[in-house]
Amino acid sequence: MNKHFKMLVIIGLFVPNLVACKGEVDSEGVNEELAYNLNFQEMKKEQVDLMHLNREGERHNYALNRQAKELALEAQTKEEETTEATTKASENAYLANNTITPAEETVAVQESTVEETKDFVSYLNIASTTNQLLVVSASGSRAEVSLHNKDASGNWQQILVCNGYVGSAGVGETAEGMKKTPSGVYDFTFAFGNAANPGALLSYTQCDDSYYWVDDVNSAYYNKFVTTNEVTPDWTSAEHISEVAVYSYVLAFNYNASCIPGKGSAFFVHVSNGRATAGCIAVPEENMLTIIRNVGPGCKILIDNKENIGGY
């Protein structure tokens, strides 16, 4: 047999099998690739689904967190409102129980002033000799009159101050008829007047027209307070108490207590008529009432020109 013919026969026998094998291989490869692609698509879908689930979970968690925050904020707001209402109620209750009336407020301010501002009387040497002092600080025939008390703790407090008058000749060393108010420190002795007793702390005499204060230097009763119901007049000059309008309320002090003739007589604190006096100290009636109701036993009166007051 021809050599070439044999080769063709051999090739003819093997080629179909080879083609068949290749077809089988290609078919298997295609199937594997399809399976792979299907698996990949399924995995991709699962990932997408998982992502959607995760996002849904995040949204749900976000909504829950937001709701929780809103509930917490609402609870905090209610708590603050409750606290504010309770505080307001407590403040209102305190104010209702501790409201200061104008009068109480004035007293509180006065007390604070007393504590913060020391009364000038406490700096005077005379302050150690008495518990009460009426100060007459003069300038010409006018004066500032002030009443001061020492309390149980030893602190001085001013309880009255007002304007007043002294003698038309001012203040200083005096004598009968000089119209000058005597300077110095004196003790109050008693009270009297044409009006009924207003509540004086010192002994008070309501005068009728039998009462006189004698200023006759030749009388045995010179510089004395007398009633004709008890003594026989020996004077040619005396102040007839009932005839003197400013003697409605009077405080006497012990100037010339020895009744030395000519040294001066009838020096008092009494109600003012708006003019300088013949030697007495005069203040408005409302202030005189305060003074006569507060001056007690042991009270002293200091009289001098204002520049000399600090020397006592």
Image: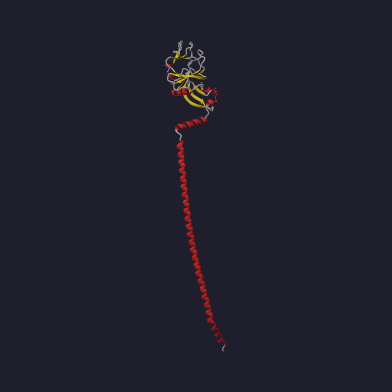
> x, y (%) of residue 199?
45, 22
In the figure, residue 238 lies in which quadrant? top left
> x, y (%) of residue 279?
48, 18
Which quadrant: the C terminus?
Answer: top right
> Is residue 82 in view?
yes
> Is residue 170 in view?
no
Which color scheme does this rendered protein use?
Answer: secondary structure
Relative to residue 277, is residue 154 drawn left or right? Answer: right
Tag count: 0
| Residue located at (46% from left, 45% from top) | 82
| Residue located at (45% from left, 39% from top) | 93
Above or below for 128 versus 54:
above
> x, y (%) of residue 137?
50, 23
Above or below for 217 versus 311:
above
Above or below for 38 versus 159:
below
| Residue located at (46% from left, 43% from top) | 86
In the figure, residue 129 lies in which quadrant? top right
As drawn, the residue found furthest toward the right would be: 3
As drawn, the residue found furthest toward the bottom would be: 1
Above or below for 137 versus 71:
above
> x, y (%) of residue 294?
48, 24
Which quadrant: the N terminus?
Answer: bottom right
| Residue located at (47% from left, 55% from top) | 64
